[in-house]
Image (tube, rainbow, N blue to C red):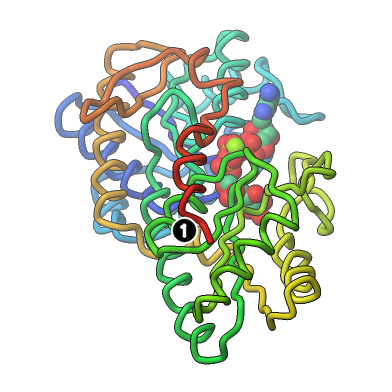
């Protein structure tokens, strides 16, 4: 009987459990597969730390946030125990025929390297940031947008009551999809994204024009937003597990600047990991389940080096090369269209 190992890697994301369930149900009922789950991302793969995944283990998990397997930013090549040779030994010991890596662009890059080193591996794209180019949408994004939109709606009522300018910071390292969708959905007066620097003068002009017609300005800013004179996004929290700057905090810089330049009392809120945790939306559960079922079919066909993806309404198979090294950013024409009605 064919046996496959599943891992979740990178930041967690609502819908991961729906993928795990969809894979196990499709694989066990349609293909007669067996599955195990590696704990804590590539760490479990490197150390052969795995748990059995059968129908009873995945029962009722689609509606749970996070991942029952745990996740991490541990790399499969981390010394002293990582590397393809060691992983091959672990896979052989556990009797595993192939690996399903569920993760973002970094996870797909790692999986691609493992593939080149002879490990049979396929991928499932996940990220709340929706910045993976090879798929139209990733699960988790819809949930994050719902949470961020509700946050904007709530900030508006308190902002209106006090006649304050409210600034909400959402996630988005290189791509401002969450900021764009939540900002447009909630009718924000300015949306600031990593793709398009905006000057403080321009932001204050939008804020002032809102105030001048008797409204309370609402600004949504992505964590990766930069003023024109910034080379890198704001970071003051050190590095993450993969040695990249941890972002977050640009709203705390922006709010006092707006207050100083416009005279409008301004407050900042950083939404943070609230937008990544908790129950997935129905849409994300459906996409996660479809991805899970499709990746079970993919390993049944032994099409290593591919990732499942959403194109239009279809689930398709794309090579890792399409998913690695290309960030799906907000098109500048789309931003320009939205920007035309800021203020
Ligand atoms: N080019 C690479 N070669 C080997 N390992 C890599 C590479 N890129 C990333 N990794 C490993 O894969 C892990 C997961 O990648 P990353 O932290 O970028 O998250 P992700 O999968 O992109 O998800 P998200 O960005 O949504 O949190 C990294 O922490 C790192 O250990
Ligand atoms: O604090 P963590 O878990 O390292 O993750 C933060 C990052 O994760 C992401 O949400 C992607 O999952 C980015 O937008 C953000 O910069
Ligand atoms: Mg990533």
Residue at 79% from the left image edge and 52% from the top image edge: 234
Q: Position of residue 141 (x, y in %)?
A: 42, 48
Q: Position of residue 226 (x, y in %)?
A: 74, 47
* Picture quadrant where residue 272 is located: bottom right
Give the quadrant of the N terminus. top left
Residue at far bottom of view? 161
Q: Is residue 310 above or below residue 251?
A: above
Q: Residue at x 51, y 56 (%)?
A: 342
Camera sees residue 129: yes
Residue 201 located left or right of residue 93: right
The reply, left or right, for residue 257 in relation to residue 17 is: right
What is the quadrant of residue 306 in the picture? top left
Q: Is residue 269 above or below residue 329?
A: below
Badge 1 element: helix
Q: Position of residue 45 (x, y in %)?
A: 58, 32
Ligand 3, seen in the image, is in the quarter at top right
Can residue 10 be seen in the rendering of this structure? no
For the residue carrying disc 1, how many other residues have a C-alpha within 10 Å: few (<14), some (14-19), or many (20+)? Answer: many
- Residue underneath mark 1: 183
The answer as to whether callout 1 falls within 8 Å of ligand 2 is no
Residue drawn at x 57%, y 8% as measured from the top left: 118
The location of residue 6, given as percent across then percent down, is: 44, 35
Front one among 224 and 16: 224
246 vs 288, left or right, is: right
Give the quadrant of residue 97: top left
How many marks are shown on the rendered structure? 1
**Looking at the image, residue 173 lies above or below residue 253:** above
Looking at this view, is 167 or 282 the one in front? 167
């Amino acid at each position: 009987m064919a046996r496959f190992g599943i891992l979740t890697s990178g930041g967690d994301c609502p819908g991961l459990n729906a993928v795990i369930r969809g894979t196990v149900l499709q694989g066990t009922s349609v293909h007669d597969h067996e599955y195990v789950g590696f704990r804590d991302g590539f760490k479990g793969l490197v150390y052969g730390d795995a748990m059995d995944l059968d129908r009873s283990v995945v029962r009722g998990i689609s509606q749970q946030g996070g991942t029952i397997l745990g996740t991490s930013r541990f790399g499969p090549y981390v010394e002293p125990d990582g590397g393809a040779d060691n992983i091959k030994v672990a896979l052989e010991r556990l009797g595993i025929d192939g690996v399903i890596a569920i993760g973002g662009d970094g996870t797909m890059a790692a999986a691609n390297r493992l593939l080149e080193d002879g490990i049979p591996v396929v991928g499932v794209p996940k990220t709340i940031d929706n910045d993976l180019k090879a798929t139209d949408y990733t699960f988790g994004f819809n949930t994050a947008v719902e949470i961020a939109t509700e946050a904007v709606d709530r900030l508006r009522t308190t902002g209106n009551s006090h006649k304050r300018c409210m600034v909400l910071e959402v996630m988005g390292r290189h791509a401002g999809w969450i900021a764009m969708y939540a900002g447009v959905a909630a009718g924000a007066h300015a949306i600031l994204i990593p793709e398009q620097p905006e000057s403080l003068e321009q932001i204050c002009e939008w804020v002032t024009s809102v105030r001048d017609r008797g409204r309370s300005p609402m600004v949504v800013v992505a964590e990766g937003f930069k003023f024109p004179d910034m080379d890198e996004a704001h970071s003051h929290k050190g590095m993450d597990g993969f040695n990249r700057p941890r972002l977050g905090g640009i709203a705390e810089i922006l709010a006092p600047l707006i207050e100083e330049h416009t005279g409008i009392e301004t407050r900042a809120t950083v939404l943070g990991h609230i937008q990544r945790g908790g129950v997935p939306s129905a849409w994300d559960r459906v996409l996660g389940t479809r991805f899970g079922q499709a990746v079970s079919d993919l390993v049944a066909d032994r099409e290593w080096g591919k990732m499942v993806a959403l194109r239009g309404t279809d689930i398709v198979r794309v090579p890792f090369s399409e998913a690695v090294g290309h960030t799906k950013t907000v098109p500048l024409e789309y931003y320009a269209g939205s920007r035309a009605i800021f203020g």
